[in-house]
């Protein structure tokens, strides 16, 4: 993937010289810039007043110490982050990730991507992301609570219902949001929608838990119908991960008639030709919080294989990576293509390496980047904010209809932008351009700030 325009090349070089040690951020930035040359050529005025230079620089990047005590009374120290990337179209919005791999490069790439994803939803949401290099695996409930309270003891001063509204991501689910939000309310002496993904009994929205996985499948269904005159019905689907996004992608894909034959975690994967047993998967991952290999113990006809990347050796029609960034290498993409892949939708952020994206782009495979495919989560978070602001509580059916409409409209935006800018059907180019246009126009309109 080469950047064709000199202005865009200069922006990329500037970012790399300023932050030489942020490879994930460079990767996300390059993927965007590669798509933007027709915009720069057709509408150079959109890039005047340093829009691109401003766009690659977060408005604020906060790094802080998170000190907490483990079960044996030992003091532990982690590093916390929040990047408030861009607020041109609304309050900062983006999840929190607790995982040992979190560093400022990962947070910066996620916050950058979030800016364009939020733009695509059509909702007034700016881009942000945060987290910590904390590993929740194997921690007791009390340790998780202690960590979350300490993390929020710094974060609370930077967020608020109209300022910055965090949500979950890897390692931050309903339990962690509860502890974080509880501490926020206590410190601020206020109960307001400063976080999304809240419990239904505390101002949360119905369908937020399911939203990212369901949205991924709604996008897939719309795309397959409109671009291939087919649907998920009867398709063999492989979904990596077994967390929030993966579980609800399995649920909706099955409801739409697909046969989901594999899921994974970071240790290995389960292949179940009969189709993944969803109640069993939920029991193991959501209730008992065990490793995925436990599935094999309870369903001996399934196969368990150590090592998570092998999941892409399994022949399938549709691949939905839902674990983490760069989980699909060039070699995995080659195997998927050789095995007859029709479509790949990124449930995880930046699921594919740059080489894998390039390879898939050369083939007749429908490829949907994360900023379009997994936008359902933040979209329903936006709906949660609207309900909180209006002191309202909408029905499951209403939120589900709105989610479907938003995912179909994201598909429309990506397709139209791809057509208008000379890359018909290239949803990567379409998503990047459509996401960028709204943010760039808002930044131009507000002047140099
Ligand atoms: P969870 O923590 O619920 O689940 C993550 C899953 O991915 C787990 O099964 C985990 O396995 C696996 N995983 C994590 N890191 C790795 C790794 N390095 N290698 C292999 N497997 C790994 O997170 P979510 O489901 O919420 O998030 C998954 C992805 O979806 C992330 O990329 C996130 O940014 C993206 N996303 C999430 C949204 C949401 O609403 N939650 C919204 C939009 C995007 P293990 O337990 O072994 O670590």
Image (cartoon, grey):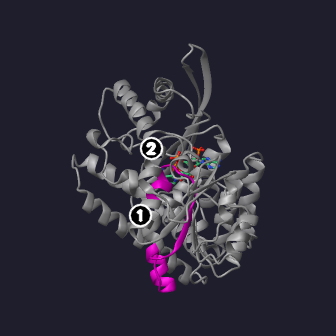
The mark total stands at 2
Say the numbered circle drawn on residue 323: none
Q: Is mark 1 within 8 Å of ligand 1?
A: no
- Please determine whether, in this image, residue 289 is positioned above or below residue 359: above
Of residues 193 and 202, the one drawn nearer to the viewer in this rendering? 202
Q: Position of residue 118 (x, y in %)?
A: 47, 58
Residue 234 falls inside the magenta stretch: yes
Q: Is residue 157 left or right of residue 205?
A: right
- Please determine whether, in this image, residue 78 is positioned above or below residue 17: above
The residue under the point 51% across, 84% down is 227
Q: Position of residue 369 (x, y in %)?
A: 58, 66
The crowding category of the residue bearing disc 1, from other C-alpha atoms within 10 Å (few below 14, some 14 to 19, many at least 20), is some
Give the structural element (helix, strand or loop) at label 2. Answer: helix
Q: Is residue 356 left or right of residue 151?
A: right
Q: Earlier in the sequence, mark 2 or mark 1?
A: 1
Q: Position of residue 250 (x, y in %)?
A: 47, 60
Give the structural element (helix, strand or loop) at label 1. Answer: helix
Confirm whether residue 71 shows in the render.
yes
The crowding category of the residue bearing disc 2, from other C-alpha atoms within 10 Å (few below 14, some 14 to 19, many at least 20), is some
Of residues 195 and 448, the one drawn nearer to the viewer in this rendering? 195
Q: What residue would you read off at disc 1?
A: 252
Find the residue positioned furthest to the top.
73
Say the numbered circle drawn on residue 286: 2
Of residues 269 and 147, the one drawn nearer to the viewer in this rendering? 269
Residue 225 falls inside the magenta stretch: yes
């Amino acid at each position: 993937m080469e950047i064709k325009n000199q202005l865009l090349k200069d922006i990329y070089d500037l970012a790399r010289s300023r932050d030489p040690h942020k490879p994930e951020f460079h990767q996300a930035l390059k993927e965007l810039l590669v798509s933007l040359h027709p915009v720069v050529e057709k509408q150079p005025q959109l890039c005047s007043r340093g829009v691109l230079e401003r766009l690659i620089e977060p408005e604020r990047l906060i790094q802080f110490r998170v000190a907490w005590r483990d079960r044996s009374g030992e003091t532990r120290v982690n590093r916390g982050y929040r990047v408030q990337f861009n607020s041109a179209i609304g309050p900062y919005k983006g999840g929190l990730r607790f995982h040992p791999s979190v560093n400022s490069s990962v947070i910066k790439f996620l916050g950058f991507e979030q800016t364009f994803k939020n733009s695509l939803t059509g909702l007034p949401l700016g881009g942000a992301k945060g987290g910590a290099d904390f590993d929740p695996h194997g921690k007791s409930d009390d340790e998780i609570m202690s960590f979350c309270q300490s993390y929020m003891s710094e974060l609370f001063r930077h967020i608020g219902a109209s300022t910055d509204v965090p949500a979950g991501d890897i390692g931050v689910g309903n339990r962690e949001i509860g502890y974080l939000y509880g501490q926020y309310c206590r410190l601020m002496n206020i109960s307001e929608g400063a976080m999304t993904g809240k419990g239904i009994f505390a101002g949360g929205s119905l369908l937020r838990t399911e939203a990212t996985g369901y949205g991924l499948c709604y996008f897939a269904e719309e795309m397959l119908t409109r671009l291939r005159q087919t649907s998920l019905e009867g398709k063999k689907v492989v979904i990596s991960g077994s967390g929030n996004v993966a579980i609800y992608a399995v649920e909706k894909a099955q409801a739409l008639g697909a046969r989901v034959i594999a899921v994974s975690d970071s240790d290995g994967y389960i292949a179940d030709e009969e189709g993944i047993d969803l109640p069993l998967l939920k029991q193991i991952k959501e209730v008992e919080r065990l490793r995925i290999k436990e599935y094999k113990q309870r369903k001996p006809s399934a196969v368990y294989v150590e090592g998570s990347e092998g999941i892409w050796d399994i022949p399938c029609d549709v691949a939905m990576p839902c674990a983490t960034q760069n989980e699909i290498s060039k070699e995995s993409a080659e195997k998927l293509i050789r095995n007859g892949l029709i479509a790949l939708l990124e449930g995880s952020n930046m699921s594919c390496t740059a080489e894998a994206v390039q390879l898939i782009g050369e083939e007749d495979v429908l490829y949907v980047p994360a900023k379009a495919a997994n936008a359902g989560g933040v979209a329903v978070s936006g709906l949660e904010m609207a309900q909180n602001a209006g002191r309202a509580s909408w029905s499951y059916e209403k939120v589900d209809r709105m989610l479907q409409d938003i995912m179909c409209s994201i598909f429309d935006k990506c397709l139209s932008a791809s057509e208008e800018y000379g890359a018909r059907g290239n949803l990567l180019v379409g998503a990047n351009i459509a996401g960028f246009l709204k943010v760039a126009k808002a930044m131009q309109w507000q002047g140099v700030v």
